Amino acid sequence: MQAFRVLRRPPRAATVAAALCVALALPAVQAQQPASVPTPQQPAAVLPGDDFYAYANGEWLAATEIPADRGSWGAGYVVAEQTSERIRQLIEAAARQPGGADVKRVADHYQAFMNEAGIEAKGAAPLAPVLKKIEAIRDRKSLAQALGASVRADVDPLNNTDFQTENLFGVWIAQGLTDPAHYTPYLLQGGLGLPDRAYYLDENERMSRLRTAYQAHVAAMLKLAGCTEPEARAARVFELERKLAQAHATREDSADIQKANNAWTDKDFAAKAPGLDWPAFFAAAGLSKQRKFIVYHPGAVAGAAALAAEMPLQAWKDWLAFHAVNQYSGVLPKAFVEQRFEFYGRTLAGTPALSPRWKRGLSSVNEALPEAVGKMYVERYFPPEAKARVQKMVANIVDAFHHRIDRLDWMAPATKAEAHAKLKVLYVGVGYPEKWASYDGLEIRPDDAFGNAWRASQFRYQRQLAKLGTKVDPKEWCMPPQLVNAVNMPMQNALNFPAAILQPPFFDPHGTDAANYGGIGAVIGHEISHSFDDQGAQFDSKGRLRDWWTKADLEHFQQASAALVAQYSAYQAFPDLKLNGQLTLSENLADLAGLAAALDAYHVTLGGKATLDADRQFFLGYAQSWRNKFREATLRTRIATDGHAPDQWRVYTVRNVDEWYKAFDVQPGQKLYLPPEQRVRVW
């Protein structure tokens, strides 16, 4: 259901950088290496049954420092760093010897971003036309037009757990929840510059301090943009956002797809969400011809519409101006970049230093031209034999799920039949999409960093709108190949495993099956299991939102789920903060099911000759793929907002797998030991 989240998405979609490749003399694909065997990294004083995470990763944890420009650091980030360095070389080579049109677009985009002197020379001038339009707002109709013109296709609730945006609303174009044959626009909540409603509403010292710092940030950005009375404007912006936050759904409610299935016609908005001039809004948003919508967050949409009528026009103008500056600060002069980092990086995430400019340049290119660069990356760094080996693993793990479903004694025959049907139609994309996106018509100039980012954002939005009225593509990807991540897309009954995650420690084309099944195999199983977890089980084999479980099946599943909620809610990250087992339930279920199915599939490859040593390698491969370190502020934010448990506790799901106890001789009295009757068993 949700993205695997090896890496989390920072503000403004600064995902791992994209790549391009041209036929130049560049470093060859990594030569074959001897197969590596996972080994424990902790002295014998730490027993695997007391802390398996430390047992598997102790040496790495002791020797590793979080880089100054990061809030956390781990296996996924190491892979991303290697990918970024490859991309950097490819782009710089392409700048010297451009290839086709999209290659030139990527090289020009990167060149414009890296031209810091040119950006400094322009100052805040690129903002002037944007701010002038905002200042020209004179009535509620022109406000609605400005709000509509600002929306983008920058949310994805089901595939990437992107539930909100800085814009007033986020638009997502996907097939209907109960109509898999037609693309439908979804409207999601937005308008906040802080990560979540809780940051505006929770009454505690930390949130209060962050609210004060945020208002100072808003004022500083507006001052840099040349706005008068920045402190007064910042106060109005914060008050407007505080009122928006009051209407926002919680993170837990956002994850409940049943609460999102709100079909509205274009005529419903005036009655259900009065206050906003909806015809003017939809016309400016390019949706004036659309008659059917799904309002994912009806309370937030109604609340925002009411505020469009109630709040002073000046407050809205200040809000629009700030978010325009805030979202595009990365392509403005250094003062804007540093101010944004001061709040979002240092204050909010506890990150000491700003990333080097070249890394931010790669992120900017990846955001603007993800598939253009991804296509070139896989041509250079993802050989066919690697894809073939992963596809074989996928087939084995799908078979393992079929067998596990057959062995379930609690599931009714009709439910089993639909579960098998979902597996049979499952599309698994490995490495890269079957059809590449075209960037024809997107203007990228080597001397216009701000304009490039602005036009690319509009281009993506228009490309998403163009899907309306066309045939649904069941094999469409939602992730670029150069992203270190993986995803289950429930309405499409599809999985994506981008090329960038298919490298060590997750997958080594020259590594052992034990390590690969423990690493990428568990990821594959994780994503497959999302088709049957508390979220995916709500979609049938055709991708329709439909209840296909019997009452008894659901009751058993909920009992097992409740046990996992309790298990994870008991974990104490800090003296004053525990994990939220309900928030992380879907991902914890997927971790457990994925690990178990991957182990089954691995055992099949051994021809029934599994050994304790083989299982030890498997579990160590799993634990070592999750090695990670967090700064305190980053970890606190993740626990509060992310549907994935932090990596250390994801590893602890091994305590629910019987084979782990045998492999490491885990005994009663050890900290992770659970009696057999307390081990959570679902699939």
Image (spheres, grey):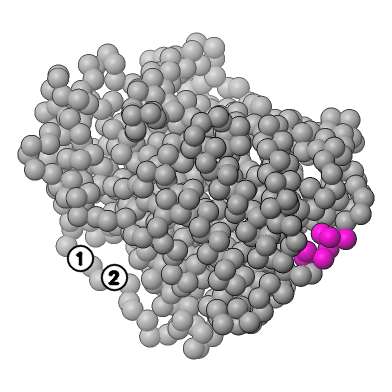
Magenta segment includes 135: yes
> Mark 1 to mark 2: distance in Å?
8 Å
Choose between 342 and 531: the one closer to the eye. 342
Choose between 367 and 479: the one closer to the eye. 367
Rendering quarter of residue 617: top left
Regarding mark 2 in the picture, which secondary structure is present there? loop
The answer to whether the residues at label 1 and label 2 have Cβ atoms under 8 Å apart is yes
Q: Main secondary structure of the magenta part?
A: helix
Q: Amino acid at mark 2?
A: Gln
Residue found 73% across the figure and 41% down from its top? 240
Q: In the displayed orientation, state which residue is furthest to the left.
A: 44
Residue stretch rendered in magenta on the structure = 130-136
The answer to whether residue 347 is above or below residue 26 is: above
Q: Which residue is mark 2?
A: 30
Q: Which percent across, then down, holds residue 273?
A: 83, 33
- Whether residue 367 sits left or right of residue 57 in the image: it is right
Q: Which residue is mark 1?
A: 33
Q: Which percent across, then down, holds residue 13?
A: 56, 56
Q: Which percent across, then down, holds residue 242?
A: 68, 38
- Whether residue 175 sits left or right of residue 554 in the image: it is right
Regarding mark 1 in the picture, which secondary structure is present there? loop
